[in-house]
Image (cartoon, rainbow, N blue to C red):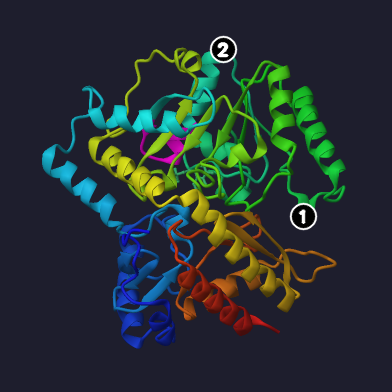
Amino acid sequence: MSNVQTAPQTASTHAADAAGPTPAAESRTRTLTAAQSDYLYPWVRPYYGEPLALSRGEGVWLTDVDGDEYLDLFAGILTTSVGHCNPAVVEAARAQMERLGHTSALYVTEGQIEAARSLADIAPGALRTSCFTNSGTEAVESAVATARLYTGRHEIVALRLSYSGRSTLTSHMTAQGAWRLPGGGVDGIVHARSPYLYRSPVGAGPEATDFFIDDLVEVIETTTGGKPAAFFAETIQGVAGVIVPPPDYFRRAAEVIRSYGGLFIIDEVQAGFGRTGERWFGIEHWGVEPDIMVMAKGIANGFPVGATVTRPEIAEAWQGPSISTYGGNSISMAAMHATLGVMKRENVRARAAERGAQLRAGLEALKRAHGWIGEVRGMGLMQGIEMVEDRDGRAPDGARAGALLEAAREERLLIGRGGLNGHVIRIGPSLLISEDEMEEGIRRLAAACRRIDG
Ligand SMILES: Cc1ncc(COP(=O)(O)O)c(C=O)c1O
């Protein structure tokens, strides 16, 4: 293993000073929080009753404006895939900035071609043609536009509980009320049931897959004109609370949409780039090849890159004109190239499987200790803890999940939250997290759980 991920201190040194925010941190944070609400839209809303203002990072460690240090198991929403300020990524971006910063997509750049080539190398099957934008939202928009142009059709079947972005279209592909832009829906988007086994009305056995697939067919038959352009799904629904579809779901869903003449689009914004362990992309675990794939977040370790990848004959349908001023820009492409290089050298697919198993064992132990953990689920380094009032009734317990987020912060541990009721804790650290760091993370999480027991 290279030293790119070496933490500034050992995990045990970090453990020693995990005693909660200092008074100085509170006052500086308060000043910044007040300024934030003076100058920024209210929707730019940070976590925590008293928001956290961060100023430095290295690997899985973050330091706030007053010098308190946190262990980060959420990675800026599963995005700093090879760790904060990974030296190889920082150096690649810095060197590119010194050589040539912005040109716009009006000119050919080697970096963009190389980035597309490296995606073609790792994308499943015949997927080899890419376009680059600046966010997951734009990558989803591009995927939908591609499917519509290729099929000459309009309607998109998405899944309930999904999260697809913040534009007008993608916020209405999103099927969680709170995340949709107000003011009505967008034409041509319908939603089938999320394959949410824990809350399936027919249980979690094999009949559940039949139930979800039947619903997909019914939605197409009853709420579209029978000619959908595409079925669109996240491999693992992240914002929904790490919902992992059953093993045969995607193969059968792809068969259904193709039988109606539509394409199968998979969103790997959260699950991609080794996070699920063993494979580059989550969908490979389901053994089905999508027609279009959407990527962002972990692709460039925090540099703004969205990618839409498809087969050449499908991409051919979009002749343009269309442009993204910053899409595929040299600096982001250099960062992406460096990120993928680190991922290959460090074998993140194997590491995510190993550290994921370690994390999962730790979370299962927490479930045994606390009756309010209804389910632990996920793959590799994308795991969730569903919190319930009790295991029999399974009523979602968003209040306790909120308390756990705050308690973890007191333990100087950063985790995430999701679920329709904010009742799922989400964990998705850098894929380079070490065994000791993971152990320390589990220890801090256990301490946070004890704080909110009772
Ligand atoms: C699955 C998925 N798709 C798309 C997006 C939108 O990405 P962005 O916030 O980069 O626009 C997100 C963001 O969380 C996501 O989780």
Q: Residues within 10 Å of mark 1 (few under 14, many from 20)?
A: some
How far across and down, in percent of the image, does residue 331 sit? 24, 41
Report the side of 197 relative to 377 (left or right).
right
Can you tell which mark lies on residue 90? none
Which structural element holds mark 2?
Answer: loop
**Circle 2 residue:** 152
Residue at point 26%, 26% (across, down): 105
Q: Quadrant of the N terminus?
A: bottom left
Residue at point 74%, 30% (across, down): 252
**Residue 234 in sight:** no
Say above or below: 292 vs 92: above
Residue at point 84%, 36% (across, down): 210
Between 130 and 29, the one nearer to me in the picture: 130
Q: What amino acid is at disc 2?
A: Gly
Tell me the quarter of the picture where residue 31 sits. bottom left
Q: Residues within 10 Å of mark 2 (few under 14, many from 20)?
A: few
Tell me the quarter of the picture where residue 222 sits. top right
Report the side of 201 relative to 300 (left or right).
right
Q: What amino acid is at disc 1?
A: Tyr
How far across and down, in percent of the image, does residue 93 sit? 23, 46
**Residue 310 in sight:** yes
**Circle 1 residue:** 198
Which structural element holds mark 1?
Answer: helix
Say above or below: 30 vs 38: below
Residue at point 77%, 55% (across, down): 198
Q: Say if the magenta span includes residue 78.
A: no
Between 309 and 275, the one nearer to me in the picture: 275
Between 314 and 22, the one nearer to me in the picture: 314
**Span colored in magenta:** 132-140
